[in-house]
Image (tube, rainbow, N blue to C red):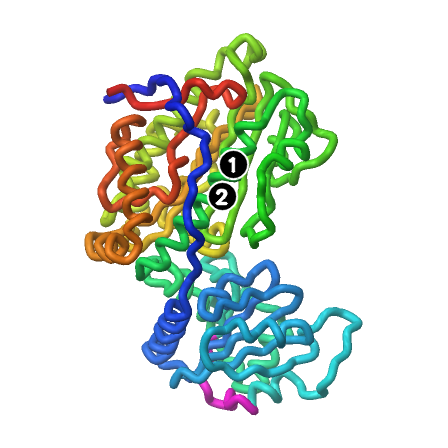
Amino acid sequence: MSRVVRIASPEGILNEEQVKPVRLEDSVYERRKDLLTKRIQEKNLDFAVLYGDREHFANIEYFTRYDCRFEETLLIVRKDGKAWILVGNEGMAYSYIVPYEIERLYYGNFSLQGQPRNNSTTLSQMMEAIGIRKGCQVGLAGYKYYEKATEDKEAYTFDVPYYIVRSLHKAAGEDQITDFTRELTGLPDGLRMTVRDANEIAFIEYQSVTAANRVRSMLRSAKAGMTEMEISCQAGADLRESMTYANILAGKRSVSLGLKSPDDFSVLEDGSPMTISYSTRGSMCARSGMASTGYDKLGEDEKKEFDEFYENYWHAIASWYGTVTEGVTGGEIFETVHRYVGAEKFGVGLNPGHCIGMDEWSNSPVSEKSQLKLGSGLHFQCDIVACMNRPVMTAICEDTVVIADKKLRNELKCQYPEVYARIMERQQFMRETLGIALHEDVLPMSGHNGVMFPFLLDRKEMFALEA
């Protein structure tokens, strides 16, 4: 069995990658909408109704390019493909971002509190005007589907505001409305769970490199004495949409809080824990470890645990990359990771790996004894979070991959040769420099995949598997 060693970091390891912007093409959204229409037909439904809001925008965005901003939104699709979008005051103009023919309906109560309500039609009346009437079979999708500890049967449990559910009940009947969320984000065949063409991969790569570049910039700039806000100012970030709040965390208290945003008062000390993360829509990049210039800056308790904690952690990362491939089960990945960080002191509580999209966590096939198999087109995060409480030490080395079979890889090579060439270089780096036995169908979405430094303030060395 290979052991973890430290190697000299290659020159320029934190240099930013230069890539051309890629936008998802209109045809991608048109194809997705066609797939949604087909799924409605397969489930013998008359309509699908998708709910979205500012936080839970990803389902509607996936099919329309429209991401809910200030208002709630409904996307309604009939079994013949006819589509409607229901928006409030400020969503109407923005709804013209939808790249195909869609009927726009104004529902005033989706507008912000205190704004004008310029119609008096109730939501149930609007549903009936669309054609959702007594006896229609309607699938209603919120953000999550439920499997355990629900008050009603899961098919009748909705992650949607109550007044919308009641309006649909009034229009069609209570028994006619069933949950449709699993058809979007369920595994293995939820519509959103598969990347289907080269344009999607090229877009994900662009977004991933952008996120990784921001993390690289902050890692290069971080020094003892800087506040979290000063470190965050070094990101060089633009104002594009993100999936999550950025985490720039300095010191035991901030790191222990986990989801906290950077502030002006928490100061990075040499020898303390640190987390840096940044997301774009389509990717999350994160690093967490000891912000130290060397062993001599660690406390006595940290020195006792440091090598075992971080070497085992990165061994889990390397083994994750070496295990992931089309056909492997989530249970196999779980078992491989927990071989190295399964002990209680590592504090690994979340799934070691999950699906991602325009939202940061859409589902996960990885759990103990899971028989779900990874398929081609899986948009996947290497995301193993280890947390030790005494002493406070954390480890995160999170990056994005796509699983792509030969057909999808050839399509990428043909349509986006520069993207394909960069991916081939990254695979070579991970195999030859990091020592990871990466499968050919695992496409690293940035050059930062798998790169982890023992000391975040002294990046002269990084982890690798012994040759």
Crowdedness of circle 2 by 10 Å Cα count: few (<14), some, many (20+)?
Answer: many
Is residue 6 visible in the rendered structure shown here? yes
Assign a secondary structure to mark 1: helix
Residue at the image point whose x is 69% and y is 25% from the top: 267
Q: Position of residue 75 (x, y in %)?
A: 52, 75
Residue 7 falls left or right of residue 456: left
Q: CA distance from mark 2 to mark 1?
A: 7 Å
Q: Could you say which is closer to the camera, residue 107 or residue 364? A: 107
Q: Position of residue 180 (x, y in %)?
A: 44, 70
Residue at the image point whose x is 33% and y is 53% from the top: 378
Q: Which residue is mark 2?
A: 211
Q: Quadrant of the C terminus?
A: top left
Total tally of numbered discs in the picture: 2
Q: Could you say which is closer to the camera, residue 330 or residue 343? A: 330
Residue at the image point whose x is 71% and y is 86% from the top: 119
Cβ atoms under marks 2 and 1 closer than 8 Å: yes
The span picked out in magenta is 129-139
Q: Quadrant of the N terminus?
A: top left
What amino acid is found at the position of numbered circle 1 in the picture? Val
Q: Is residue 375 above or below residue 180?
A: above
Q: Which residue is mark 1?
A: 215
Q: Position of residue 368 (x, y in %)?
A: 35, 42
